[in-house]
Amino acid sequence: MKVLKFGGTSVGSASNINNVISILDNKSKDSKVITVVSAVGGITDKLLAAGNLAIRKDETYKDIFIEVQNIHISLVKELIPSDNETIISAVETKFKDLESLLEGLYLLNELTPKISDKLVSFGELMSSYIIVKCMATRGLDVIRKNSQELIITNSDHGNAEVELTITEKNIQTYFKESKSLITILPGFVAKNQDGEETTLGRGGSDFTASIIAAALNVEILEIWTDVSGMYTANPKLVKQAVPIEQLSFQEAMELSHFGAKVLYPPTVQPVLDANIPILIKNTMQPNDAGTKISDETKASIKNPVKGITHINDIALLTLQGPGMVGIPGFSKRLFETLANEKINVIFITQASSEHAICFGIDIKDSQTAQKIIDKTFEYEITLKKIEPILVETGLSIIALIGDNMKNYQGISGRMFSTLGKNNINVRAIAQGASERNISAVIDKSDVKKTLNSLHERFFEVQTKQLNVFIVGVGNVGERLIDQIEQQHSFLKEKLKIDVRIVGMANSRKMVFNDEGIDLENWPSAFDFAEQSNLERFFNKVIELNLRNSIFVDITADEKVSDWYAQYLRNSIAVVACNKIACSGAYDIYENLHNLALSFNTAFLYETNVGAGLPIINTLNNLVASGDKVTSIQAVLSGSLNFVFNHFGDHTNFHDTVKRAQFEGYTEPDPRIDLSGIDVARKILILARENGGKMEIEDIENESFLTTANLESSSVDDFYDTLKEDESHFQHIYASAKTNNCQLKYVAEFKDGKAKVGLREIPEGHPFYNLEGKDNIVMFYTERYPEQPLIVKGAGAGADVTASGLFADIIKIGNK
């Protein structure tokens, strides 16, 4: 004999009911089947809504009545397409009873618990009737038994307690004599010993099935719903969540209590007492394995955590004050006050100082709790021995569940370090001695990020999801997007990093997709994008609140760099090729690093110097390893190197600069490159990374440009002055040629001082044969005093700059 229960979604449509019938047909081939069914999905709420409208003299209750009637008649017509007149007539007759009940409520203006039970019982009674009639027309050996004739309760209407001795005897007697292969029973409904209709409250249909299974001591209770078992986390919030193969009764009750809606904890008790396993199955996917709940334990050696769950809409209340310390009785009075008002306490924690007791309750009870607690402790509050109760709302409880967590070290550490890295503030913590449940109170807005972060940490193959937001989708930005798309599968497989671009903006528009922008056709995303705005971009990043978020600045805009501090304060990593922040005022540079440290996030800007070359990283490694950098000599402008490698007595300076700009080696305003300010910023950044507290004004800039070049009013004007001053540039070239030297724009740092300027480099010097757009840096240190450590390679260009940004992103992923 088997006991199955089908929930509201399982019987919520004709197609789903057909699935139910198919399952029962298969199950009945080798055993008798007892089936408990819920009301059609949503019907109970509609019945209560109609009743409440009726007692308020709101005649729209009739609209709900007609809607409910039409839903059931439509089911009959879909399930039994022909010869259904008799059944439809019977359904309409039953609905006349419901109509009369609602009319009575309209006249009496009162919906008592007793009448409410009668009203909401209608859903299960009707669904069970229709299913049985449908199955009978298909030739199945089926009978309907009204649960109200078997399950007897007390008279506590709305949440009646079952009289187990009488009920078990009724169940055992009936099914001992029943010959039908399939028995359908309405869940949730019962009667008291006076024959008055009662209901079993929340989860009542599960409870009905559990009572029957325990009374008949069956091998297993199957609960069929719309999901394939209990999941490692809420699959609506965590896409990677998977069904849990096996749970203990205690684990299942913990998960159910903390928000897993598949099972209601009290329903477990009858089968738990009888040691009968429960199997959670999916009506729409009956071949899925589902979740087995029993007294067996099957803990993973690698992961003792079975699930992550949460409860929303929590209020956190704190009773505190110096008068509580060492004085017995405060806890008793506090919780006795709440119990008298039937307020359920979900969460409790108390520090060893006894200065405060903190507890969580449903937010709907918070105002009542505040009022009655302040009244209970009115005398102590007046004497200022304790403070008025503190109430905080907008919170949720998150919990790790697993029987065997107590046997593994570091579970709590992994949990809270993961939360900390994602800027998730923990308001309170509770962990019982059994260590089956580790709970934390967090802001409700952080629930999705918390669930995904913890699920990634405990259940996924250590694949870290990085959520990237890019500002500046120009030449370099396009290359970065292409590189991320190209390497996505490789990174996921080899490095266990899943890089998603969630937001992007150019100077005109910005676009977001919290599931990740389609990188195969990303330009089309801008077709219907909103107008670009840095403040709205930041607010959207905060609103999405995604784990492992990274803000990438691919601009040269000071207004963008002004937002770095805000991102870092929210534990959002910043990756920048924009040099303004790191080469601006030292206080800003220092503050950004302090923020990154304080909020446990990353601020990376390798591309500030040398594009994709690991110059800053090499310098940092030298310093971190204890070496002392004594001097730095470098060619740091791929743009200027390109210009002076292509300028000569057969080309003019104007055309060479134009070519460099056209090929993307200079900024849109080439004056930034040719004035030397860009190189000055780079050597300033290296000096700061080496510990120097310098400002840009401290860099000596020996310009090779003329006064007319430097004072030009626009880019066009600048190019005009280059033509006019061609003889000046030819003179510079001629001098270098005469001395058998190459022209290189060199940056130097030594003895706490830095300078930049055009130099004639003699043959044999490491800078002499530097070609194209290449950069080179020579680090002289205590460990490299004579032969410097050299970093050399392409220092400009969209592809290498994008690869440098990409490397910083991957570095964050590997952290």
Image (cartoon, rainbow, N blue to C red):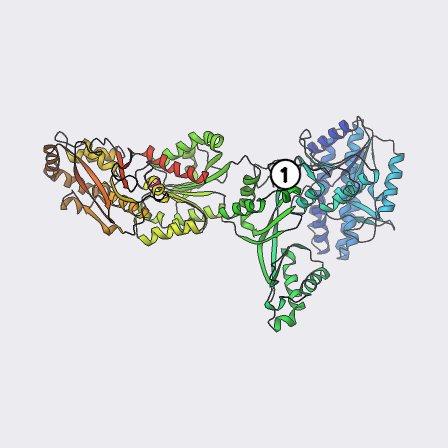
Instruction: Kindly give the residue lying farthest to the bottom in the view shown.
Output: 383
- Residue 302 percent location from the top left of the image: 59, 36
Q: Is residue 710 left or right of residue 184?
A: left
Residue 105 lies left or right of residue 781; in this view the side is: right
Residue 145 in view of the camera? no
Can you give x and y, in whole percent of width and height, for residue 647 in the image? 17, 32
Q: Nearer the viewer, residue 207 or 350?
A: 350
Residue 404 falls in which quadrant of the image?
top right
Q: Is residue 614 magenta?
A: yes
What residue do we see at 74% from left, 47% from top? 266
Residue sitting nearer the eye, 105 or 504: 504
* Res. 628 image quadrant: top left
The residue wearing badge 1 is: 231
Position of residue 178 relative to residue 552, above or below, is: above
First to last magenta residue range = 609-617
| Whole-percent x, y for residue 295 in the image | 73, 39
Q: Which residue occupies the foreground of this view, 81 or 460?
A: 460
Considering the image in quadrants, where does the N terminus appear?
Answer: top right
- Is 347 displayed left or right of 275 in the figure? left
